[in-house]
């Protein structure tokens, strides 16, 4: 199904993913996307294998997406949720994971409110030669690789539905607006988008996007790029650009990705109010005038309509890629489970 | 499987269901009831299709019944419950539904504490040409069509197990006792039973059955019917009769359906006490003397034994259709999912 | 799959299980253990049958184990949990069970915080000739037969992986340490281990192991056995020995099974502190010196590391049978579901 050989046993973060990795994932996801448009949407790829969803942080949307992906690969699924669990009884997270391993788990999909938990579990699984794959479904503010990969697939499909390729991303301008500082979605997207040659522009109020944010990202310098601190309220390094005002960032943008605003940011005094946030950073039809005529809007969901973007944009099928992101999610997660499920 | 063509994409309420619709459902349910008595109880009818249970109001019994129906049709199932959901994160109900649509849902089974939510979702699905069917699994005090349809199937099977037909209902007297005012089960049963030619008698204290209740039901007048306010504490219009005392209502009854009494009705001062309710409106063996010798008792469950009816009646296999209602529920829901799943 | 005929419709406790019963279960579990090591881990044994998990007491580990066992037998599964259930609405437990029966349940797996509930349900099912099997998945402090049976299977496999037999247990010394008084795991293990010829030594502080504890167990006297109250803080009857100090009990032990310590025992003033408990009754590498050189450690999980046993013991693959217990759990539960599922 994929051109080059896949050898990663785990998908924990995208920091070291190569363009070849991304291309393999896109091709595999595209095959499964095609399966999903058939009448019988199932393939026997993972028949007899057990996929366990260890969602220490509750989630409906992502868990359902992984669950459906697993079902369509004909795997058996176990769901762990901490509500009625052994964790309350004093068991460690590693012991919980090992219990599901001993039951016969082949793949673990792990979400945890603390950064690093999926990596710790993966490391332990390798140490004991468990032979299971670990897929990070979101850990703290660290990474959410499957979201960034479905975003990548969505972007490339929107550029060429028949043949989604990372080459299409070259030189495209992607603007990410919102609570960058606390967002694992933003972090994972920065790694994937810059690795595939896009120009990534981050926009947020300074409380949610400090200057030092760039330091963590060590991306190859593109020739037409350079650090600048031009006084228009923006700072850039290599392919990554920081903005504290929305309007200049949107200029000629190809994709505008709005992030979810957590209500708790208000109580933490990082934002004055939802209304004020919307006035300064909300995506509106008027503001999109500055973008490229074919601009597309994205959002990882769930959306606060009227905060991150206006309702009419969300519902405009010409502009919004949001439903395509959800559909791509199932195909992309099928691809990820399939790829790491095939590693021996 | 059905004689006449089914063309409804959604089942939201029974207001406009025709005798032909009911007959089609009975025939389809009867076929599936036969499947359930085989050794292998599965059919591949909905293989590869995704049925999503969106239960905004928690439920165990109804959800399990739909889940089993879906499994026996070989569908894949996604379960959404609001406990750990995006709703808490500010997402609208329509956006939740559209997310599950974009994941690949073909049929949505929706329960919500507010009347009208399934209809609103169905309307939006049609507006965007989603091609999915919506099945109302209970919305506020409005409707619970699958319950009324399984009740209809149960009644007709009890009259002729081999060949359940709506014609059997002609002229039968069905008494519904309990909290009529707040009951979506009563409302849906009134539509279906009167449409199939039964005489429906409603019994409750005046706080739970106001005179104006009849106004909502606009059923064809039967020749032997007429409004009367005879002073015996009853009022009738067309095939629908209201009673504020139990004994006169039970006279010559063929079916007595007791409704669940919500404990909260006491705190709302609509009822003095469970004990007093039972004394006035509880079904007892003694009171059943007035009924037709072949009278059957029904209850949608869950039952408060000793309140709505006495324990010995509930456990009398000659009298109680309660277990048959549950079994009919799976067959009827298979029929409904099958019928709307086949609409293109 | 089994040599002798299995005729028990329910598995409620192990009090009256014969050596032949245990041998049948071991043989059946061994066959399924072999299935689990194949590439396709499924058998069609219970295809079309419905297994309902009625877990009135919440559980993740045991429910997942039963769920996976059921899936690998190709059964359909319904999960009932009391969180969002009819019980809150006043329904009796028997009515809940009968509702799932009427939906088409063939096997019920029941956990309840009150001793006796699975037996009461089984009795009622037989009374109404329901033809369903009931499997007790833990009831109060009474019994947890599937745990004791998986422990038996684990012990016998550790003695002879190719051919697990109860004969291997003859004369083996099994030490059970911990909160014996409140443990359904201990009770069920005492029945099975003594019936298969092991010498069982119970160790706990007197608050968690009163002298009269022995009275409930009426096991055949072995020739080399006799009641003794020798003053070394121990009392013994037949194959069952009581100790209030750990060290003497461990002497020459073949298996040491630590029980989970519930944190609530502290608030009930039955124990001074976790630290003190560990000092007196915690399993450590040093203390294991007194045991047989091939001693193995067991724990039903979830474990409080550093309380019941030290972390390094738990992680020592030479010593710890804990992961094997979990794996055996799936195979043993497949065997139990298969055996009672085949009773007509």
Image (spheres, coloured by chain):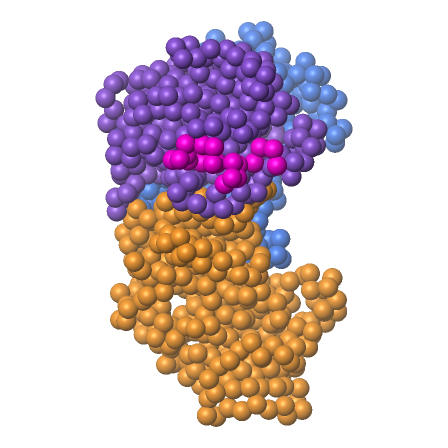
Chain colours: A blue, B purple, C orange
Q: Is residue B284 magenta?
A: yes
Foreground: C252 or C107? C107
Left or right side of B60 for B90: right
Region rendered in magenta: B279-298
Q: Is residue C176 visible?
A: yes
Residue A208: name its quadrant: top right
Residue A4: x and y in percent read 32, 39
Query: Which residue is rendered at x = 61% and y = 26% of the image?
Result: B205
Q: Is residue A160 visible?
A: no
Query: Which residue is rendered at x = 37% and y = 52% of the image?
Result: C130
Query: Which residue is rendered at x = 30% and y = 58% of the image?
Result: C344
Q: Is residue A230 above or below residue B185?
A: above
Left or right side of A296 for A27: left
Q: Is residue C171 magenta?
A: no
Residue C267: name its quadrant: bottom right
Quadrant where the image shows the N terminus of chain A:
top left
Residue B292: name its quadrant: top left
Foreground: C83 or B239? B239
Residue C255: x and y in percent read 50, 77
Residue B112: x and y in percent read 54, 26
What is the number of callouts on the image?
0
Query: Which residue is rendered at x = 38% and y = 35% of the image?
Result: B294
Q: Is residue A116 above or below residue C33?
A: above
Q: Is residue C178 above or below residue B68?
A: below
Residue C135: x and y in percent read 43, 59
């Amino acid at each position: 199904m994929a051109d080059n050989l896949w050898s990663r046993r785990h998908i924990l973060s995208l920091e070291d993913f190569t363009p070849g990795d991304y291309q393999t994932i896109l091709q595999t996801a595209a095959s499964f996307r095609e399966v999903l448009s058939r009448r019988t949407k199932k393939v026997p790829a993972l028949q007899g294998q057990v996929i366990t969803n260890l969602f220490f942080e509750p989630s409906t949307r992502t868990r359902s997406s992984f669950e459906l992906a697993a079902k369509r690969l004909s795997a058996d699924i176990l769901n762990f949720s901490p509500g009625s669990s052994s964790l309350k009884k004093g068991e460690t997270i590693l012991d919980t994971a090992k219990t599901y391993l001993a039951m016969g788990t082949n793949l673990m999909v792990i979400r945890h409110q603390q950064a690093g938990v999926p990596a710790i579990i993966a490391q332990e699984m390798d140490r004991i030669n468990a032979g299971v794959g670990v897929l990070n479904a979101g850990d703290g503010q660290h990474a959410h690789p499957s979201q960034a990969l479905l975003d990548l697939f969505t972007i490339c499909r929107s550029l060429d539905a028949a043949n989604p390729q990372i080459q299409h991303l070259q030189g495209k301008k992607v603007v990410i607006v919102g609570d960058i500082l606390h967002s694992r979605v933003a972090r994972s997207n920065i790694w994937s988008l810059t690795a595939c040659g896009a120009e990534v522009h981050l926009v947020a109020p300074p409380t949610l996007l400090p200057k030092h944010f760039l330091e963590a990202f060590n991306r190859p310098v593109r020739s037409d790029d350079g650090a600048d601190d031009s006084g228009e309220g923006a700072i850039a390094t290599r392919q990554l650009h920081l903005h504290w005002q929305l309007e200049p960032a949107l200029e000629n943008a190809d994709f505008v990705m709005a992030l979810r605003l957590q209500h708790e940011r208000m109580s933490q005094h990082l934002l004055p109010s939802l209304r004020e946030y919307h006035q300064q950073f909300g995506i509106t039809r008027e503001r999109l005038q500055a973008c490229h005529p074919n601009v597309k809007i994205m959002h990882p969901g769930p959306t606060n309509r009227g905060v991150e973007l206006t309702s009419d944009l969300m519902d405009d099928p010409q502009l919004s890629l949001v439903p395509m992101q959800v559909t791509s999610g199932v195909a992309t997660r099928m691809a990820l489970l399939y790829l790491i499920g095939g590693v021996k």
